[in-house]
Image: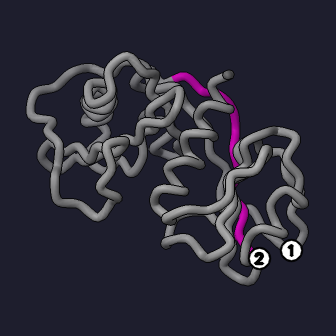
Amino acid sequence: MDGRRAAAAENAAWCALVAGGGRRGPRAWTSASRTPEFYPDAVTLDPAATAADVLPFVDASAGCSVKDSFAALDLPGFSVLFVATWIACGPGIAEPGWRRVTEHAFPADASVAVLSCGPAQVVAHRGDDVVGLSNFSGPARAWPGAVAAVASAFPGVPVVGYEHGDALQVALDHGAEPLGPLRVWVR
């Protein structure tokens, strides 16, 4: 599986876990009910996905959001909320002080690790082929340690994620490799 497909599949699995279910079709994961704030109602899994693979399976009313994992969809009535880049994060640089946080707002599941070091925090989710790094917060200098903490939480599995804007530049400055664009659409 190529890096972007693996990242999209992991992200869809993460969204399904946070949303408490959903439907995984051949080209998209979708949720018939609205997902929690900041999580999409659908994630495409294949660059050939179309609006027909997504819209019949979501509540497409105002507020619906779709993660277009390959920046390839045409969604009439939606507008692009932001464009981001899938990234392969590399091994990071181990820093002392990173630890698992046991009390957090994310699902309690063996595939999830919430990690913290001082003011920095990151969430890791183990997918089938990769570990997704998300919800990083903290100073830019903490990024390499966050990546290493995620890699340490799930050893031997590539670490991927997506970023945009200044956060993307921080990741790239610390060795992340771009895998390709994605778009998040909103109605």
Q: Hey, which residue is sitting farthest left in the picture?
A: 97
Q: Secondary structure at mark 1?
A: loop
The residue depicted at 61 percent of the width and 31 percent of the height is: 6
Residue 158 screen position, x and y as percent: 46, 22
Give the distance between the C-alpha atoms of the residues marked 2 and 1, in whole angstroms.
Answer: 10 Å
Can you tell which of label 2 and label 1 is closer to the viewer?
2
- Residue sitting at 27 percent across and 30 percent down? 153
Residue 173: percent from left, percent from top:
44, 26
The percent coordinates of residue 148 (x first, y second) are: 28, 25
Label tally: 2
Which quadrant of the figure contains the N terminus? Answer: top right
Numbered badge on residue 77 = 1
Looking at the rendered structure, the kind of residue marked 1 is Gly
* Image marks 2 and 1: residues in contact by CB distance under 8 Å: yes
* Viewer-nearest residue: 81 or 105: 105
Q: Is residue 173 left or right of residue 143?
A: right
The colour mode here is: one colour
Mark 2, secondary structure of its residue: loop
Dominant SS of magenta comes to strand
Magenta segment boundaries in residue numbering: 177-187
Q: Is residue 128 above or below residue 104?
A: above
Residue placed most toward the observer, 144 or 51: 51
State which tag comes first along the sequence, 2 or 1: 2
Name the image quarter holding residue 64: bottom right
Q: On the image, numbered disc 2 is attached to which residue?
A: 60
Decide which of 57, 151 is in the foreground and name it. 57
